[in-house]
Amino acid sequence: MLRSDTIAAAATPFGMSGIAVIRVSGPEALAVARRIFRPSNRPCDWKSHHLYHGDIVCADGETVLDEILIAFMRKPRSFTGEDVVEISCHGNPVIIQSILDQLQKLGCRLAGPGEFSQRAFLNNRFDLSQAEALASMIGAQSEKAYAVGLAQLKGSLSKEIETIRGLVIEALALMEASIDFAEDTAEAELVQIPPQINQAMERMQRLLTSYRFARAYSEGVHVVITGKPNVGKSSLLNALAGKKKAIVTDIPGTTRDLIADTIHIGGIPVHLTDTAGIREPQNVIEQEGIALVWKKLAEADIVIIMLDVSKPLTEEDKITIDKNTSEKIIVAVNKIDLPRSWETKSIANLFPPHTKFLEISAKSGSGLEELKRTILDLSVDGETESTSGAILTNLRHKHAVEQSLKNIQNAKESVTAGLSAEFIAFDLREALDHLDEITGKKINDEILDRIFSSFCIGK
């Protein structure tokens, strides 16, 4: 529900910086600004979308808090669709808090998380998927994730949902006409429905396919490096990270805790984790470290099993191999710069058919570029995409599309089975409702509050 009070918050993170921005939105935004702003030379005429220089003062009109720039944006041409004032002050938390204190004294309420965006949505400045795209852009971990978020903010997903929605509405209109004029139109209209249903289903399936690689770009993938002690796991982490993250020695069991770093491969954040070597624990600390390994492996998107080709396979190698149940496994046959004890093809039968085998030298760097390409390929399931097209990045959107697709499949089956138009129309209406959850045309206040509460304060 849209509230009518005036809210204020810092739109930039608290901390030392050159500039900070404080945003005020609501019916009293301009009145509050008039009371705390003293222009530097000539009277301020408060034209919309103009920038003014001067001092911000306490509510008493005397004490100067800071030298600022201030802008007024008259509704509806503002971020929230309300009257908005933005104050650019020096980025000192003491100054920011002092200004917010004065704004509160003049009747402003401190905004909650995402409240500015929620007001923008309720004032039809953008739909719900665009609001969520804004949050995704702010939290983007890579350029590709940012580009996807920007495309969605510009309406790429909204337009695709509207296209699908149009197809469903077209089919629904024919069905409802069949209900109203059953004797005259039912047979003719039923023949026209399957093409529209099929088109909608195809578009939905493309969206669902896009989620796999979009998730990789937006959230990154978790890659866990495992193997017996002294097989080269820490050396591989250091080589991929391009810096020394883990201690490398000839002493087995050096790594006892999880060591992590994030790199970017093809625009995807890859969260690497080096783990303790798999062997019979020598002490309680190592036992805890190995227990963490099994937990981390269960959570991994991709597992790299490292084997030392310069030595025969041991029982410790076999334990690592047998206990790995990941669907995406890369076997990194390491130390190819040393004399071999076995050939890679001789161990293929120890692994599932989908396993990728690569020969590398973590020490010299040989094979690492191919390893990166393999990680990238597994991250996006071999898919290619365009960041400007309609892509699903949000789990809420994915669930809504899945539910809508299920309803449309039911409608298609009902047409094939020759069921009455009432049954088909019911499923199509349900499909529309789920599509409308994505853009916010149909969503309850509780879910809306939950979505915006995950946003940062000031946005």
Image (cartoon, rainbow, N blue to C red):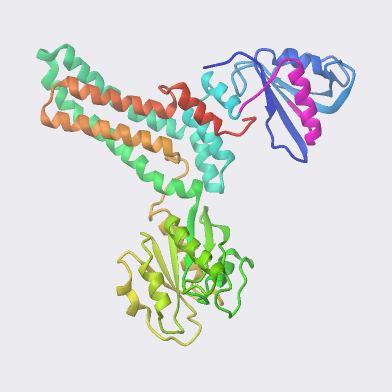
Give 160 or 67, whichever is nearer the viewer: 67
At a point 50% along the width and 42% down the height, the residue shown is 148
Q: Which residues are magenta?
A: 87-112
Q: Is residue 214 above or below residue 20?
A: below
Determine the residue positioned at 30% across, 66% down.
Answer: 353
In the rendered structure, the answer to whether residue 114 lies left or right of residue 379 reads: right
Q: Is residue 110 magenta?
A: yes
State the image coordinates of residue 320 (x, y, percent, origin top left). Answer: 41, 70
Corner quadrant of residue 258: bottom right
Magenta residue check for 391? no
Quarter of the picture holding the C terminus: top right
Comparing 327 with 230, the one in front is 230
Marks counted in the figure total 0
Q: Quadrant of residue 325?
A: bottom left
Query: 284 or 2: nearer the eye?
Result: 284
Can residue 390 be seen here? The reply is no
Above or below residue 422? Residue 328 is below
- In this rendering, position of residue 428 left or right of residue 77: left
Name of the residue lying farthest toward the front: 284
Point out residue 275 in the picture as x, y percentages from the top left corner.
Answer: 52, 66
**What residue do we see at 35% from left, 45% from top?**
209
Q: Is residue 348 left or right of residue 142?
A: left
Query: Where does residue 168 sit, x and y in percent of width and height?
Result: 29, 26
Image spot of residue 322 (x, y percent): 35, 69
**Residue 428 in view:** yes
Above or below, 314 against 168 in this view is below
